[in-house]
Amino acid sequence: METKVEALQDNRVKVTVTVDAKDIDTRIKKTYKDFAHKYNFPGFRAGKAPRPIIDNALGAEAVPATVTDDVVNATYPLAIDDNNLFPVAKPKFAEDMGLVEGGKPFEYSFEVEVKPEYELTNYEPVEVSLPPEGASDAEIEQQIEALREHYYDYEDAAAATKVKEDSFLDIAMKATDDAGEEIESMTTDSRLYGLGAGILPPAFDAEIVGMKKGQKKEFSIDMPAEPTILTQPLMGKTAKINFEVEVKVVKNKVLPEVTDEWAKDTLGFEDVADLKKRIAESIVQQKEDVLPRMKENQALQALAERLEGEVPEGMLEDSETSLLQDFFQQLQSQGVSFDAYLAQQGITADQFKQDVKQQAQDMAKQDLALDAWARHFDMTVTDEDVAEEFVKSGVEDPKALQAEWRKNGQLHMVRSGILRTRAALDVVEKAVVTEMQPATAEEIKEEKKSSKKTAAKKTTKKDEAAGEEASEKKPAKKPAAKKAKKDEADKAADAE
């Protein structure tokens, strides 16, 4: 078999394949013999019918057409591998291919879109930012602060204390819908309530900010466009919620002191020193597991940003298909349905599709960037490398598997995989690492305070701007500043 490759536009190539006459004659002879055994020809025993009888019974083109299909299907994958092509779409064969003839070579051609060979804007080592190895004092303090935040308690604040945007309070309230019917799930004589926890809408929180112990207030809010914990069951059932609220007491959040007694009695450690030692060991172990992956992800992402060119649609479809196959195999192994997964993640099917498309885009760009890196640094893959890859797969007969992959025209995938792995290792090894300094516990507290102020300002501005339109517009979703208060929100939700 001989092949010739001609470059066309838009990452397409034309491949011309010539199969020698000897091979064609062998295939024709075998096909006649197969037909003689396969079909019943009157007057002849199985396998003994001569060619003229077979041609007369099945048609003169039956055997040539069968041989032509067999030749094309058997040789075009080999032509792809022999020329190191990487198709990103199915080949398109010439319509006027013709049929094989005995004693003559057979020539056919096909066009196929192949992986483009893009360049990178530069081939200097990429830069990544990673946390330092080991466990710093600041990181240990962060973990201890997180534990304190988890094991907090409440105490009554002074009677003159006003409700703030992040306050917790004991509250009594009566809630009714727009028909005046009482809403039992919200009506209570006493409830621990945390503002900004997502239990009730931001519009409710805005109404009670500034109230003090013993004060009462009546007000109405529109049903929010995005449901909260308590408004979810009411979606579509009422347009407004009417409240009668009494602040029974404002609560102060009290964090435990870090003492040997607290470390032992609450957390089960010998003392504070033992607590810090165990935290340090945990941080070190986590970093040993996570830092290599973080470095690789950042390095490949930085490399992909240097790619000059757009990813072909065929590559995107392949990447998306691969991601979906892996995803649904994992779901099946875990015994989880797709609907259950969406519910757990709190996303829609459309959001899931968009996420997969973005991941496919990122994955394809990284692959093309690694290909460019491998070409630039003259990385190659030998036949021995390919054979070794099949040996490492652990199958019983690696040679047979390799032969099957070659027959199917899939060896280019193995070569590309080896090259990309080598390129990725090279990129990561050469990467310039900048150590990130972990924030101190005080810096984290200041950041939380700043986030709270920002959230409060945004809510206030919204309320002021609403004016007379408040009854027509639905309250906006509260900014994500309260995200840092997850533990407090969880505890309030638990109390709920």
Image: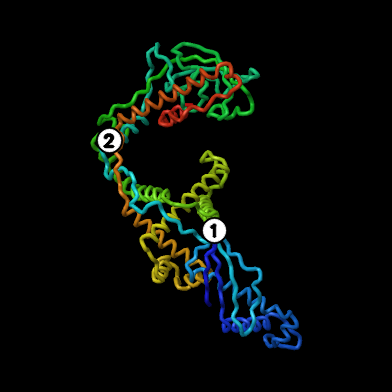
Q: What residue did someone put label 1 on? A: 10
Q: Mark 1, mark 2: which one is toward the viewer?
A: 1
Residue 193 horizontal side relative to residue 225, left or right:
left
State the image coordinates of residue 347 (x, y, percent, origin top left).
54, 40
Please name the residue shown 38% across and 47% down the image. Answer: 298
Residue 239 sits in quarter:
top right
Judge whether 324 appears above or below 20 on screen. above
**First of labels 1, 2 by sequence position:** 1
Please name the residue shown 30% across and 40% down the image. Answer: 436
> In the image, what residue type sits under mark 1?
Asp
State the image coordinates of residue 95 (x, y, percent, origin top left).
65, 68
- The disc placed on residue 138 is 2
Judge whether 77 appears above or below 377 on screen. below
Spatial CA span between label 1 and label 2: 54 Å
Q: How is the image coloured?
A: rainbow
Judge whether 211 appears above or below 238 on screen. above
Which of the pair 357/142 is nearer the observer?
357
Q: Is residue 332 visible?
A: no
State the image coordinates of residue 206 (x, y, percent, origin top left).
49, 19
State the image coordinates of residue 463 (x, y, percent, origin top left).
51, 19
> In the image, what residue type sits under mark 2?
Ala
Residue 265 horizontal side relative to residue 44, left or right:
left
Q: Secondary structure at mark 2?
A: helix
Q: Which residue occupies the extreme left position in the image? A: 273
Which of the pair 322/400 is nearer the observer?
322
Q: Secondary structure at mark 1?
A: loop
- The disc placed on residue 68 is none
Please name the residue shown 55% across and 43% down the image. Answer: 340
Which of the pair 55/405 is nearer the observer?
55
Q: Is residue 66 visible?
A: yes
